[in-house]
Image (cartoon, grey):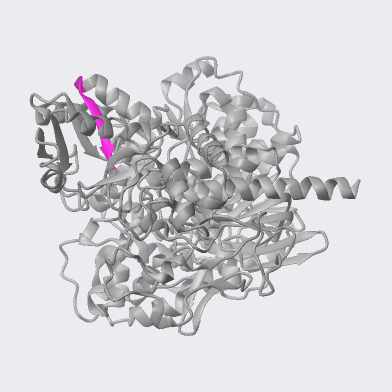
Amino acid sequence: MSDKKIPTIIPTINFKEKAIELLPEGASFEACLTCGLCSSGCPASGIENMDPRKFIRMAMLGMDEELSTTPWVWCCTQCKRCQHVCPMSIDISQLVFLARGNWPQEEKPSGIVRSCQLIRSTDSTSAMGLPPEDFVFVVEDVLEEVRETQPAFKNLQAPMDKKGAHFFVNQNSREPMSEPDEMVPLWKIFDLVGADWTYSSKGWAAENFCMFSGDEEAWYEVIKKRVEAVNELGCKVWLNTECGHSYYTMWNALNRFGMEADFKLESLITYYAEWIREGKLPVNSKWNTKNIKFTVQDPCMIVRKAYGESIADDMRFVVKTLIGEENFIDMQPNRSANYCCGGGGGFLQAGMTDHRRTYGKRKFDQIAATGAAYVLTPCHNCHSQMEDIGHHYGGNYGVVHFWTLICLSLGILGENERTYLGPDLLALID
Amino acid sequence: MREEARHFETELAVIGSGIAGFAASIFALNRKIDTAQVGNTGAVAYTTGYLDLLGSIEGSGVAVDNPWDGIEQLKKTHPDHPLCQVPAGDIRKGFEQFTAFLGECGIAYSAPHDSNLTALTPAGTLKKTLCVPATMAAGPKAFAAKTPCVIIDFKGLKGFSARQVVANLQDKWPSLSAERITFPAMDKGEIYPEVMARALEVPATRQELAVLLKQAAGDAKVIGLPALLGMHEPDKVRTELEQLTGLQIFEIPTMPPSVPGIRLREMFEQVFPQKGITLIPQQKVVSLDFDAGGALLTLSDNYGPITIRCKAVILATGRFLSGGLEAHITGITESLLDLPVTQPENRTDWYLDSYTDRRGHAIHKAGIEVDVSYRPLDKNGTPYNECLFAAGIILAHQDWIRGRSGAGIAIATAYKAVEAAEKFLHAAHALHK
C-alpha cells in the first residue's frame, strides 16, 4: 500500500469545513494548542509520515488533496484515543471515516472492500460469505458431535431461529468457518446458566467491515438486515458475542441512522459478570495452582467508544474471579485510556502488514511489561492481532477467549476446545 | 446508539480535572466525604511534574527562595492574592496530603520543606519550586553541588535538547556536558517521550538503554535525561536503570506533551475509582442547577446522559485553557453559571504592549470572587449558593504563571474549599437530624 501511487482521481474533501461541522459541543479548534497529546498517544503516529496532530493541522491549512489521498487513513484504526486524551475533545476519527468513504472503491484496500461485499452477498451478513444453510449445517453438525462424544452434554442445545427467545446471540464467522469447536464453550455456558437463547439463520454474523470501508450506505444495509432478523424472532436482547466492532457498528448505527429496534443491545461480558455474581456460573480460580499470570485487553469498540468504565470493571471482575486476583496484572494504560492493538478498523484485512505490526508494537510492549503468560480479550480482531504481533516480536504469551477460560475453570472444556491453551494450562487440565 | 441514562448520588461533586480538582478529591477522600469528580481532561497532562508554591513575586520577576516568607511579602504587595488568604499551616498540610497521596499511589514526591528547590527547566533555565517527583530529585542536588554530569538526549525527540540545556547552564555548571543517543528500536522519525516511557516499562528495553547510557556517561557518575523513565512505575524504572548502569540518574521535564503530567492523569484515573470516587474524567458538565437539597450536574459521555445529584459542589474548572473562563469581544465570562468575573474594565487593558513585560498582563488576573468560605459571589457580592465552593486558578487576583504558583493556588484553595464544604455538609446533616 505504502509505495502505491495514489491516483489523483480521488475526489477532494474540504476537511476544514467538515471538521468544524463535526466538532462536538464545547470543542474548539481555536483552542487547539497543537500540544500533540493526540500524536504522542497514537500508535499510528509516524506511519506514512502522518499523525493525528499533523492531520488536523493540515485540515486547518486547507491541505485537502494531501489528506484526501494519504493511505494513513487506512492505518488509523478510528480507535478515538486521540479524542480521549485531547483537552479540546477533537475527534479525528470522524475525519478519517469521511476520508475512507471518499476513496474510490477500487482504490480502497481490497481486503476490507471484499469483506464488506461478502457481508452483503448473503442473508447471513457474514464477512466470510458463509450462507445461512451452511451456518445451520455447521451448528447442527458440531452439536451432534458434542452430544455423542461428551456425555455430560448429551442434551446440549444450540437453538436456531427460535421465536421469542430472550437472547438473540450473534456469532463471528471465524468459528463456523474455520474452528467450529470454538462455538461449543459458549453453548455450554448458556446451558449451565439456563439461558433462553437462539441463533438466527439470518443476520447472525458478527462482522461489519462496511463501516471500516467508509461506506455508510452498506453499513446501514447490514445493520438493517440484522435488526430485522432480531425483530422477526421477537428477541428481547441482541447479545453480542466476544467481539468489539460488531457491537459498536450496531450500537452506533441505531442512533446514526435513526433505526427502530425493539430490543436491547448487550455484551456477553456484562452477562458473564452478572451470572457469576448471581452464582449461576460457579467459576473460581482454584484450578490455577501454578499461579499463571493473565492480563486483559480492553477492546476500544466496547470500552472507550461505547460503555466506558462499567464494562471494563465487569471484565476485570470476571477475569479476577477466573484466575485469582493475585494473578491478574493490568496493562498500562488500560480501560478507556488503553491503546488499540492495531487489529481494529479493518487493519487486519487491509493487507498492510508492516504498518499494522509497527502500530502493534505499542501493544506488544504493553503486554511484555505485564510479564503475563496470557491475554484475555473479548474481541476477535484484538485476538488475532495480539497473536500476530506476539509471534512477530518474539513474545511469549498466548491469547484466550473468555469462554475458554470459563469452561476450563468449570472443568467442562472439551478436548477439541483447547486450541488456545499453552502447555502450562493444558498441564493443569490433565 | 441506545442511550442509557445513568444517575449518581453523592455528597460532594468536584467539577474540574486539573490539579485543583484532583487535590479537592484527595482532601475529600481524606475527610471521608463521598465524592464524584467530573470535567474533561484538564491541563494536568501539561504539567512539568514540579509542584510550585510560590517561585516569584508577581510583577517583580524576582525569584523566591523561601516561599513561606514570600507569601508574607506577597501579603504586603498583593493582599487579594488567593495564597494570602490561606494560613501557612493549611498550605503545608495541603501539600503534605497531596504529595503523600501521590507517593502512596506509586509516584513518589519530595515533601514540602522550608525553602524552594532550584530545579531545571526543559530549556536549561532554572526555576524555584517546592516539591519534585523522586525521579527528578537528583537534578537540583547535582546542580547545587556542581557535580560532573552528562545531559543525554535522543535522536528524533523534539522538545528536549541536551545541547541547549548545557549551553544555558554552562556558566553556572561548568562540568556539564551533552550527549545524544538513539533510543532502542526507535531509530526512525519523530519519537515522543510518552512512547519511550512506555517502552521503558519493558525490562528488555531498560537493559538495552542501560548499555547505551553507560557509554554516553563516560567518566561522569551522574546523568540527566528528559522525563521518560517509565509511565506507571517511574521510581522502579529509575532505580533499576541506576542499578544496571551504576549511575545516578535524574529526569528533567520536557515540553508538553510530557510524561510527568500523563503519569499523574493516568494514576488519578485508575486510583480514584478504586478508592470509591465516582470519576467521570473525560466530559464537561453541561449544566449545574441548584435546589433546596443541593445541586444537580448534567453531562453526557459516549454511552449516554449522566446526572449527578450532590449536596455540595466545588467549582475547579480552571481558566481559559480548561474552559472555566471564556474570553469574548465584550468581556470575560464564567462558563458554567455566568458568575461575575473580576476583569479589566476594557478589552484594550487586557494586555500590555510587550508580551514579555515582567509586570504581567491584566487578563491573567481575571477570575471569580469568593467569600471567606470559598463560596463564589454573585453580582450583589453575596454567595451564589450556600452549597457552591470554588478552588484553583479560576479565582481572581493571581497571575499563577508569572508567580510560579499554579500548584500552590490549586492545592491551598482546594484544601480550604473542601474544609468549608465539609463544614457545610456537617451543618446540613445536623439540621436534617
Residue B355, given in percent of the width and then of the height, sits at: 28, 70
Compared with residue A282, is residue B265 higher up or lower down, i.e. above or below? below
Look at 61% across and 44% down and name the residue there: A269
Instruction: In this rendered view, identify the residue nearer to me: B161 or B241.
Output: B161
Look at 29% across and 39% down and name the residue there: B118
Is B247 part of what is drawn in magenta? yes
Which residue is farthest front?
Answer: B76
The answer to whether any part of residue A338 appears in the image is no
Among the 4 quarters of the image, the one containing residue A205: bottom right
Look at 73% across and 37% down and name the residue there: A193
Instruction: In this rendered view, identify the residue nearer to me: A331 or B381.
Output: B381
Which residue is farthest right?
Answer: B433
Residue A206, given in percent of the width and then of the height, sits at: 53, 56
Q: Quadrant of the N terminus of chain B?
A: bottom right
Is A80 part of what is drawn in magenta? no
- Does residue A96 appear to the left or right of A379 in the view shown? left
* Number of marks in picture: 0
Residue B35, given in percent of the width and then of the height, sits at: 67, 46
Residue B325, given in percent of the width and then of the height, sits at: 51, 69
Instruction: In this rendered view, identify the residue nearer to me: B271 or B406.
Output: B406
Q: Quadrant of the C terminus of chain B?
A: top right
* Majority secondary structure of magenta residues: strand
- Does residue B143 appear to the left or right of A261 in the view shown? left
Look at 52% across and 37% down and name the residue there: B92
Among the 4 quarters of the image, the one containing residue B383: bottom right
The stretch in magenta equals B245-252
The answer to whether any part of residue B153 appears in the image is yes
